[in-house]
Image: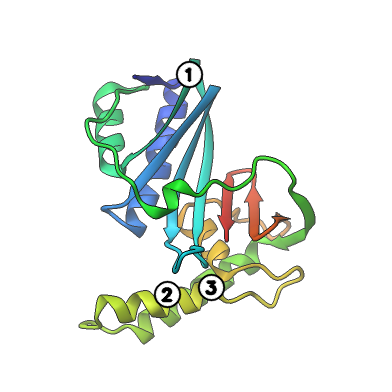
């Protein structure tokens, strides 16, 4: 099945989003969830830990499709960026699907309650401080398990903002390019059960 984006601008926007996701994990995956003429594109910023995937942080962008489709599959990030580079607005069905743990976890579509807003500038500060903490605490030669544990601790704790949000949401908004440069902008915060959603007009980051 081929997914056809509505125009070239959408294809370029998706390409940029996926390129940023690959900076987090070049060998990562992307979930392409099409319902009608809307394509939800999920990426993983911080993998969760344990049976409940505590600390999971996902990025989400939505795109308009040229024709209605019902499809839900998870594939390597590189497979999609390669196809966009060759096909323009089309994403031909990649030959290989993947099954990361996070791909089976779907945040709710409804039931989100507004809990406040946090300035983009403050979220940017949290992200940069966390990136520095991870870099200082995981020098070259650190084992992968130690690095994963450090990242989980840094991005799993809550910010001192009002309302507090998982630090991983700030990291996700930063690395995916969802934060805005002006001092007046604030990201909206919603909650639903164990999930927290922090969003700007550039995209969503959802943590569990």
> Could you tell me how far apart the alpha carbons at marks 2 and 1 are, in whole angstroms?
37 Å
Q: Label 3: state its secondary structure.
A: helix
The mark closer to the camera, 2 or 1, is 1
Quarter occupied by the C terminus: bottom right
Is 119 left or right of 141, judged from the image as shown? right
- Residue that label 3 marks: 156
Q: Quadrant of the N terminus?
A: top left
Q: Residue at x 29, y 25 (%)?
A: 93
Q: Which quadrant of the figure has residue 15?
A: top left
Q: Quadrant of residue 83?
A: top left
Q: CB under 8 Å between callouts 3 and 1? A: no
Residue 7 on image: x %, y %:
46, 20
Of helix, strand and loop, which one carries label 1? strand
Total marks shown come to: 3
Q: Secondary structure at mark 2?
A: helix
Vertical position of residue 169 compared to residue 28: above or below: below
The reply to whether discs 2 and 1 touch (Cβ–Cβ < 8 Å) is no
Decide which of tag 3 and tag 1 comes sooner along the chain: 1
Asked if 169 appears above or below 112 in the picture, the reply is below
Which residue corresponds to mark 1? 69
Q: Earlier in the sequence, mark 2 or mark 1?
A: 1
Crowding around mark 1 (Cα neighbors within 10 Å: few <14, some 14 to 19, many 20+) is some
Give the colour scheme of this rendering.
rainbow
Determine whether 10 is above or below 118 in the image.
Answer: above
Q: Residue at x 31, y 35 (%)?
A: 80
For marks 3 and 2, the one nearer the N-term is 2
Alpha-carbon span between mark 3 and mark 2: 8 Å
For label 3, the crowd category at 10 Å Cα-Cα, with few meaning under 14, some 14 to 19 and many 20 or more, is many
Which of the pair 167/122 is nearer the observer?
167
Q: Which residue is mark 2?
A: 151
- Counting from the top left corner in percent of width and height, residue 108 is at 64, 45
């Amino acid at each position: 099945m081929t997914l056809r984006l509505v125009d070239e601008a959408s294809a370029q926007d998706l390409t940029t989003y996926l390129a940023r996701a690959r900076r987090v994990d070049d060998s990562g995956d992307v979930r392409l969830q099409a319902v009608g003429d809307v394509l939800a594109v999920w990426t993983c910023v911080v993998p969760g830990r344990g049976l409940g995937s505590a600390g999971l942080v996902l990025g989400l962008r939505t795109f308009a499709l040229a024709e209605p489709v019902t499809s839900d599959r998870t594939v390597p990030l590189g497979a999609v960026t390669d196809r966009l580079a060759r096909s323009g607005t089309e994403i031909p069905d990649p030959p290989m699907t993947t099954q990361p743990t996070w791909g089976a976890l779907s945040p709710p579509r409804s039931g989100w309650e507004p809990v406040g807003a946090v300035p983009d500038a403050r979220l940017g500060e949290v992200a940069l401080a966390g990136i520095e903490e991870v870099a200082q605490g995981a020098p070259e030669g650190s084992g992968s398990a130690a690095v994963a544990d450090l990242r989980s601790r840094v991005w799993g704790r809550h910010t001192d903002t009002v309302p507090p949000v998982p630090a991983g949401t700030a990291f996700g908004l930063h690395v995916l390019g969802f934060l805005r440069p002006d001092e007046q902008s604030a990201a909206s915060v919603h909650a639903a059960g164990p999930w927290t959603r922090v969003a700007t007009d550039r995209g969503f980051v959802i943590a569990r």
